[in-house]
Image (cartoon, rainbow, N blue to C red):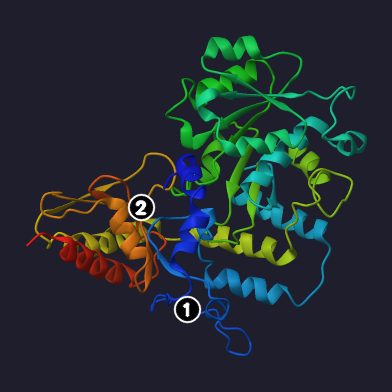
C-alpha cells in the first residue's frame, strides 16, 4: 500500500481491529512479547496479532525492529547522556552516510516536516523560535508552495509552524506564486509521477528565486540509494521515516540537509521547551536505535534481499495457482515501497467471492492475516514485512479459502 493511499485504510482501521476480537492467536512464526516474567502481553491484553501482508503501514505498527536495533535500545537504556551531545555525534555519522551536510533524528517523518520548515523560518534566532507558530509582525516568511497533486494529509505538518500552503499546478504558476512571503518549496516524492513539475525543474526554479526546498520521501526506501539521491540532487532538506523499510523505531525519523537549516530545526526540538517541537521527543535509545537501523540497512546485500522477496512471493503464487481459475501477477511500484507485489485474481464464475470477502476471511482466521482486498475478484499482498516462513502459512490459507469458495 502506497503512502498516498494510506488514509483510505486508516479511516477504517479501528473497525478492522474491533471486528475480530481477542480470540485469534499469534502467528506460529512470530516471537511472542514475553517480558521479564515470561508474560505474553498481546495475549494478556487480548490484542490481535497478525501476519502482515500489506507492508509498512503506521496504523498496523509499521515494521518489526531488527534484533540489532533492539539490542542497541536495551544496551543504551542503562546510562545517562546529554541529548544534544548525542544528536550532535549521531547526526554527524548519519549525515556522512546520507551525503548531507547535517542530520538529526526526529520523532518520525511528520515531525521532520514541521521541524525542517521551522528551521528555515527561524534560523538560529531564538526569539523567532519562541514566536512560532505566531508569524504576524515577526518578519518571518509565511507560505509554503506545493503542487496540488502533492497535497496529502501529512502536509498538515507545515501548518504547525503557522504557515499556509499555496497550491499550484504548472511551472508558470509556481514562478508567479513565489513572493517575499515564500518560505519553502515542498516536493512529495511518492507523488512525483502525478505532479506536472519534476524534481530537476522544481529545484531549478527554487534556485532561480533563492527559495529553500524540502522533499518528503518518508516511505521511499528501498531503493537504498534514495537515502542520498535527493541530497546529491540539491534538495535543502530531506525527510525520511525510520520505522518502515529500515526497521528502526516506529517513532523515529530523519531530517537531513543543509547545516544552517538543521541547526535552526534543533532549536525547535526537545530538549528545549520554548518551541513548537517540544512534544516531538525522541529518547536516547531511539536515537541510537535509529542509527543502528540506518547503518544495517545501508550495508545490507540488497540484491540478496530482493531475491529472497522474489522467492518467497513465488511460494505464495505457486500454491494459489493450483486452484482452478486462479491467476497471479507480480508488479513493482515505481515510487514508494518498491518491493514485489503479488496480485491474485480468479474467475468469478468459478469462485464467487470478492477480494474484500477473502481478505475478511483471512483476517478472521487463525492465525490472522492482513492482505489488501477490494470489491473485484482479486487481492494483493507483499511478503516484504512477513517473517521468515510466514509466506507458507499465507499461501496455505489463501489456497484453502479459494478452494472452499469454489463452485463444484
Residue nearest the observer in this picture, 82 or 97: 82
Residue nearest the observer in this picture, 7 or 176: 7
- Who's the residue at 26% across and 68% down the image? 397
Q: Along the horizontal axis of the image, is 194 left or right of 275?
A: left
Could you classify mark 2 by the number of other residues whose Cα lies within 10 Å: few (under 14), some (14-19), or many (20 or more)? many
- Who's the residue at 66% across and 71% down the image? 73
* Residue 93 image point, x, y percent: 66, 55
* Residue 346 image point, x, y percent: 17, 51
Residue 22 vertical position relative to residue 401 in the rendered view, above or below: below
| Residue receiving disc 1 | 31
- Who's the residue at 45% across and 63% down the image? 19
Q: Residue furthest left?
A: 408
Q: Earlier in the sequence, mark 1 or mark 2?
A: 1
Could you classify mark 1 by the number of other residues whose Cα lies within 10 Å: few (under 14), some (14-19), or many (20 or more)? few
Look at the numbered disc 1 and give the secondary structure of its residue: loop
Please say whether residue 342 is visible from this viewpoint. Answer: no
Q: Along the horizontal axis of the image, is 208 left or right of 309?
A: right
Residues under numbered marks 1 and 2 in contact, where contact means CB atoms less than 8 Å apart: no
Q: Along the horizontal axis of the image, is 340 left or right of 252?
A: left
* Residue 336 image point, x, y percent: 44, 43
| Residue receiving disc 2 | 372
Amino acid at each position: 500500500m502506497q503512502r498516498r493511499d494510506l488514509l483510505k485504510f486508516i479511516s477504517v482501521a479501528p473497525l478492522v481491529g474491533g471486528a475480530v476480537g481477542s480470540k485469534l492467536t499469534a502467528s506460529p512464526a512470530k516471537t511472542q512479547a514475553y517480558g521479564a516474567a515470561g508474560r505474553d502481553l498481546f495475549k494478556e491484553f487480548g490484542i490481535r496479532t497478525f501476519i502482515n501482508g500489506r507492508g509498512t503501514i503506521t496504523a498496523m505498527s509499521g515494521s518489526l525492529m531488527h534484533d540489532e536495533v533492539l539490542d542497541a535500545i536495551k544496551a543504551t537504556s542503562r546510562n545517562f547522556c546529554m541529548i544534544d551531545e548525542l544528536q550532535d555525534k549521531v547526526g554527524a555519522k548519519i549525515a556522512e552516510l546520507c551525503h548531507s551536510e547535517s542530520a538529526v533524528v526526529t520523532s518520525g517523518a511528520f515531525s521532520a516536516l514541521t521541524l525542517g520548515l521551522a528551521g528555515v523560518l527561524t534560523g538560529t534566532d531564538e526569539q523567532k523560535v519562541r514566536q512560532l507558530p505566531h508569524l504576524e509582525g515577526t518578519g518571518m516568511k509565511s507560505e509554503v508552495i506545493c503542487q496540488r497533486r502533492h497535497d496529502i494529509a501529512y502536509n498538515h505538518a507545515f501548518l504547525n509552524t503557522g504557515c499556509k500552503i499555496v497550491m499550484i499546478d504548472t511551472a508558470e504558476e509556481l514562478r508567479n506564486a513565489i513572493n517575499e512571503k515564500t518560505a519553502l518549496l515542498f516536493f512529495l516524492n511518492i507523488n512525483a509521477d502525478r505532479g506536472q513539475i519534476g524534481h530537476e525543474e522544481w529545484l531549478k526554479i527554487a534556485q532561480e528565486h533563492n527559495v529553500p526546498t524540502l522533499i518528503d520521501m518518508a516511505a521511499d526506501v528501498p531503493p537504498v540509494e534514495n537515502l542520498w539521491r535527493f541530497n546529491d540532487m540539491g534538495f535543502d532538506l530531506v525527510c525520511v521515516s525510520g520505522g518502515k523499510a529500515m526497521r528502526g523505531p516506529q517513532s523515529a525519523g530523519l531530517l537531513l540537509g543543509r547545516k544552517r537549516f538543521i541547526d535552526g530545526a534543533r532549536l525547535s526540538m526537545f530538549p528545549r521547551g520554548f518551541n513548537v517541537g517540544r512534544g516531538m521527543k525522541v529518547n536516547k535509545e531511539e536515537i541510537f536505535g535509529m542509527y543502528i537501523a540506518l547503518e544495517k540497512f545501508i550495508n545490507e546485500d540488497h540484491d540478496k534481499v530482493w531475491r529472497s522477496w522474489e522467492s518467497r512471493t513465488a511460494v505464495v503464487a505457486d500454491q494459489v495457482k493450483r486452484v482452478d481459475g486462479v491467476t497471479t501477477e507480480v508488479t513493482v511500484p515505481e515510487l514508494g515501497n518498491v518491493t514485489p507485489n503479488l496480485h491474485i485474481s480468479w474467475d468469478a464464475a468459478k469462485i464467487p467471492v470478492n477480494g474484500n470477502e477473502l481478505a475478511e476471511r483471512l483476517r478472521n482466521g487463525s492465525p490472522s492475516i492482513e492482505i489488501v482486498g477490494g470489491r473485484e475478484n482479486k487481492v494483493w499482498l507483499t511478503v516484504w514485512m512477513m517473517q521468515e516462513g510466514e509466506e507458507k502459512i499465507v499461501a496455505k490459507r489463501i489456497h484453502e479459502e479459494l478452494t472452499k469458495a469454489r463452485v463444484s
